[in-house]
Image (cartoon, rainbow, N blue to C red):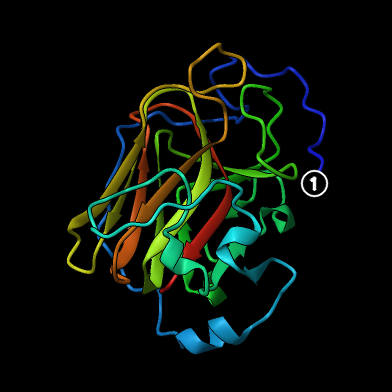
Amino acid sequence: MATSKLNRQGKSQRHLRLSDRVSTTPVVESVVSIGESNRHLYVNRSQTSSERIIYPFDRLSEQPTAVSNPADITESGLPSSAEEEKGIYLDLETLQGFEVANHQFEHWGIQFRNAIALQPSNPAYPPKSGSMVLIAGPKSGWMEVLFTQPIRAVSCYVTSSRRITLTGFNRENEAIAYTELSEANLATLNDSIAPNALLTLITETPDIYRINFSAFDGQFSVDDFYFYWD
């Protein structure tokens, strides 16, 4: 899928163009319920205008790595045991520019917090696919995703102005999975890490109820978001 042409705009190459951005310390919020859902209804739905069920390797080109320990986190894709499983790919292209992302995908059992859809005008933050990404907003430096049903794995592509962590929490709000991007990976920098780095959390059983992105007041974009129940 071709990406749209990006114009060099904005005050700084290290920031996405977004007015009235508030700078705060990253926040970790408690787990809340987002409603009762029937997981099988999600699995049996084949496609909507906003997202579709996929096999994990239909869209991840990286070679998967088997994971035998819940603490083992890989950035190279999903475990090989997931080959017969299905997941959900969220199509961000149906969102409007500067639209607050919150309940739009709740029919899949997912809710975003502090997330805004944006077509980046800053070439430092190129989309992975299409033209739309999610950024942290209105507060900078953090984003959260809540799941009605616990998931086992989540993957997305991230471009950040500084080091960013991705942490998964269980029902008791305990951190059970963790990975990080160790440094900035803006497209306009000659960094060792290319933009749109793949971040993946995996546990042996579906125990993740919430994930938190934290860039410590930095700016970041998220694209091609996937999650898997089993």
Q: Residue at x 59, y 59 (%)?
A: 57
Number of disc labels: 1
Image coordinates of residue 43 in percent, x first then y, are: 55, 82
User: Quick check: 203 left or right of 18?
Assistant: left
Occupied quadrant, residue 20: top right
Q: Name the outermost residue toward the top.
A: 190
Image coordinates of residue 224 in percent, x first then y, are: 60, 50
Q: Nearer the viewer, residue 23 or 175?
A: 175
Q: Residue at x 71, y 27 (%)?
A: 121
Q: Nearer the viewer, residue 36 or 1?
A: 1
User: Quick check: 193 left or right of 3?
Assistant: left
Local crowd size for mark 1, using a 10 Å CA cut-off: few (<14), some (14–19), many (≥20) = few
- Please, is residue 52 above or below residue 114 in the view? below
> Which residue type does callout 1 highlight?
Met
Q: Secondary structure at mark 1?
A: loop
Q: Residue at x 48, y 51 (%)?
A: 77
Image coordinates of residue 66 in percent, x first then y, are: 37, 57
Q: Which residue is mark 1?
A: 1
Point out the image quarter for the C terminus.
Answer: bottom left
Q: Nearer the viewer, residue 127 or 76?
A: 76
Image coordinates of residue 206 in percent, x first then y, are: 32, 71
Occupied quadrant, residue 131: top right
Q: Residue at x 68, y 32 (%)?
A: 120
User: Quick check: 32 left or right of 130?
Assistant: left
- Please, is residue 123 above or below residue 156 in the view? above
